[in-house]
Image (cartoon, rainbow, N blue to C red):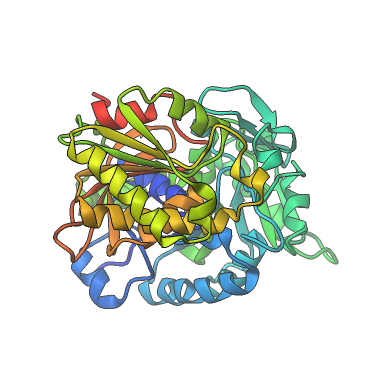
Amino acid sequence: MTQAPAVVYYGDDFTGATDTLGTAARAGLRALLFLKTPDAARIERAGPLDVLGIAGAARAMTPEAMQAELVPVAALFRSLGARVLHYKTCSTFDSAPHIGSIGAAVRALRDAVEAPWTAIVGGQPNLGRHCLFGNLFAAAGAGGEVFRIDRHPTMSQHPVTPMHEADLRRHLAGQDLTDVHSMPFTAVSKGSEALEAALQRTLQPPSPATPPNAVLFDVADAAQLATIGQVLWARAQRHTLLAVGPSSVVDALAPALAPALDSRNGTEPTQRVVTPAPDPVLVLAGSLSPVTARQVAAARSFDTVWLDASAMAQRDAATLERHARDIANGLSSGRNVLACTRPLDPLPVERGIDAQALARAGGELLARMLALMPLQRVGIAGGDTSSHAVQALDAWGLSYVADIGAGTSLCRVHSDDAALDGLEIMLKGGQMGSDDVFERLVRGSA
């Protein structure tokens, strides 16, 4: 590779990874998301990149599986000569000691960088995520009421990783990421010079105190991100740095990166729009969140196919084949189809269905359906469902096409299979997107 990327990031699920991809592309950075850790030949064929992403599923893994998943990422970072290694988390930081542990991720990656401390960016204001004095707050849906994360109507009751602690320092300490120092928004708001001085005092405390393992940066509003990014990028020029947090990490770094990249890049920030879909659209909704439920209700341009979640989770081949043919028949007649695992009553999780098994079955269903009827545009709702759906396809990468709304990017699939190459795909987490996001996927956003 003739030129090292500035940032290498690993997304702990595919929806978040595409949000970071879109964040970088909209800032004018050359970005590409690989669907697994790429080899040197694949990177060389991709051409010069400012931001190299790797989509993964670590948020659904045990600490042992995360270690195996992230060791190749650490090795790739060291080999490329990038300056910042970004472990991309969900913007709500939902994780647990036994599944998707952020602490386990830090332990797997920190030896890949030179700086002895980890930077944690605690908010993503464009999604309604704000961190104040170490405590995380999140909106309930796009433009919804903001709750402390441990009182959030959805995230406090997440079926896999419920958030019962709002103080991210205590939340991460439960994952063996101890001694996290809070850099409050009051320090961030004073500008980059004052923030650097405060960070210096934190990282080099008077004896006999020991420096922290990590520094958590509050983010009260979007304007503070550029200040954080300026300080982190300046430090990364001296020592490579591990940064943890949502897409706001790349959002923060982008303004600091732009002057160094302009001379070799010439790329301008872009605000591309989604064009109307040329053919029928399939949306696979595997999320059980109230936000996705509202989006399903608002999908007036779709015929709905209710999936047998219980049989799918048990990997019943006949059920998968029947659903695939029903969906293909609807699409072949020119209708948009919404395939939904959320029944009218009761919820699958209330019936004891394995959410991970259901997500894997959703991926298999998508692959079967596309084999029956290739499409030009699809949408996937649900973080785990998105991860498994893309992994089920014979594809190696994604590039950014356009923005459908906060946290929802339309991407282009790159595959050695001509039938899949060029497929446009929207991946969204359960909490992401406006109520009409599925309609916008069909009608466009112009």
Which residue is more in the foreground, 185 or 282?
282
The residue under the point 71% across, 39% down is: 156
Residue 104's image quarter? bottom right
Instruction: Residue lying at the far right in this picture: please name it.
Output: 208
Residue 47 pos. (x, y %):
20, 64
Residue 354 showing in the rendered view: yes
Residue 424 pos. (x, y %):
24, 45
Q: Name the quadrant of the N terminus.
A: bottom left
Residue 31 showing in the rendered view: no
Q: Is residue 308 above or below residue 214?
A: above
Q: Name the quadrant of the C terminus.
A: top left
Tally the marks: 0
Query: Would you say 68 lies left or right of 55 here?
Result: right
Query: Would you say 376 lies left or right of 81 here?
Result: left
Query: Would you say 188 lies left or right of 371 here?
Result: right
Residue 236 pos. (x, y %):
49, 60
Q: Is residue 147 above or below residue 248?
A: above
Query: Would you say 159 lies left or right of 435 here?
Result: right
Q: Is residue 426 above or below residue 3?
A: above
Which residue is more in the foreground, 56 or 376?
376
The residue under the point 63% across, 59% down is: 102
Which residue is more in the foreground, 404 or 442?
442
Residue 163 pos. (x, y %):
71, 44
